Image (cartoon, helix red, strand yellow):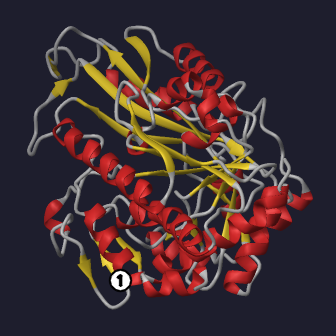
Amino acid sequence: MNWQTYLNDHYDEHLNQLLDLIRIPSVSSLPDHLPDVVRAAEWTAHKMTSVGIEHVEVMETGGHPVVYGDWLHANGRPTILIYGHFDVQPVDPIAQWHHPPFEPHVTEDRIYARGASDDKGGMITPILAIEALLATEKKVPVNVKFCFEGQEEIGSPQLPAFLAQHKEKFACDLVVSADSMQWSEDQPMLVTALKGLVGLQINVKGPRTDLHSGLHGGVLQNPIEALSNIIASLRSTDGRIAVAGFFDDVVNLTPNDRAQIAAVPFDDHNYQAELAISDFFGEPGYTTVERNWARPTLELNGIWGGFQGEGTKTVIPSMAHAKISCRLVANQSPEKIFAALKAHILAHAPQGVQVEVEKLPGRADPFFMAADHPAHKIAAAVLNELYGKEPYYVRVGGSVPVIPIFAAVLGAPTVSFGWSMGDEQLHAPNEFFRLMHLQRGPQGYVMLLKQLVDYTP
């Protein structure tokens, strides 16, 4: 029996195993679910052991666990570290789910459940690939290690120190991330860039308490107005971010970069209609996709202060607050950008109020790996064979903190090789995973591991 036949014959068994994993409500952001995160780790470890992966262990991190395992008998071949995560997002708002989020609802071509797409459906595919190879060929063509974590959805806070502590155990030539996606059912893609992230909160304090707007109006600085003026100063009227030093380390797009981005089909009008907006706005001189994928951004996430209820309450508020996040591109430092923003905000603070700038938790370095990197060339050849099409090379506006962590701590590049799709309601009610990828995903991983035998960085 060959590995393709094995995967086809065991499809129903593999589907039921995935459903069992999905039923575990491993929500990492909610302390009450920590036992469930541990249970998902133990389920993953048991499955890895059962297929022949060796030295499997659930490892403590000081937070949520990591599952390690390896198969290291391909002498002289590269070592590939496969990454994924078994923690999931909360299910709120629960009323919008059509079915209970941890009771998988299976249709002809989909599984509806929390974590089905992000990332349990993707995470299981390389395990199934190893199972098929060991069952039919008794070996894996390369050395493999696994790093499956339970804290991705909260920013992997313990992972940098954990990997540094166990650097030799996780040492590898290449990381392959199962936490990724494809462009569509019939069009593959490879992610060449992910944005970094830094967030902050502005706190503006005025009088010691809210004041009567008639008795005290016209004689003091209003914290909301002061905050509004500070926020307005962050961007020029044409849409360019007006913070000194914000663009200092940005590597400008080359003509080849712009051509590669333009090669990915994108319809501005459809996107505008999808968002229900009347026009686009942003940094001049760039296309909509270039601004989202390849230029740093600054977005206001929330603003509050004063009276928020129904009706009228004529007060001058004592405080006002705003939250801001910045997505960064290759070569930018979250710490440097935070320092630049803080300096700008304090320089624009008016007299009569106290202004504080607070760094928010959750930061990520940007990541970039060129489309012509040797690992991308191998992955592209596999996807071309699997789909019958060349992949798109995509830069993503979001952040995945763990990928630059692998680069910084292990010195290894990462290829994103996953099976979610952008329309699968990740982080939202009625998340789903396409069943076609429970078949295509393990096939893709077998093919990729076979092609990586001659990989050199």
180 on left or right of 47: right
* Residue at horizontal 56 percent and vertical 27 percent from the top: 166
Residue 393: in sight, yes or no? no
**Looking at numbered disc 1 in the image, what kind of residue is underneath it?**
Asp
- Give the answer, above or below, for where 384 lies relative to 213: below
Q: Quadrant of the N terminus?
A: bottom right
Residue 98: in sight, yes or no? yes
Q: Which residue is mark 1?
A: 12
- Give the answer, above or below, for where 367 lies relative to 96: above
* Residue at horizontal 28 percent and vertical 44 percent from the top: 37
Q: How many marks?
A: 1
The furthest residue to the front: 138
Tell me residue 348's x, y (percent). 54, 18
Tell me residue 428's x, y (percent). 32, 62
Callout 1: SS = helix
Kindly indicate the quadrant of the structure image that contains residue 408.
Answer: top right
Residue density around tag 1, few if under 14, some if 14–19, many if 20 or more, within 10 Å:
few
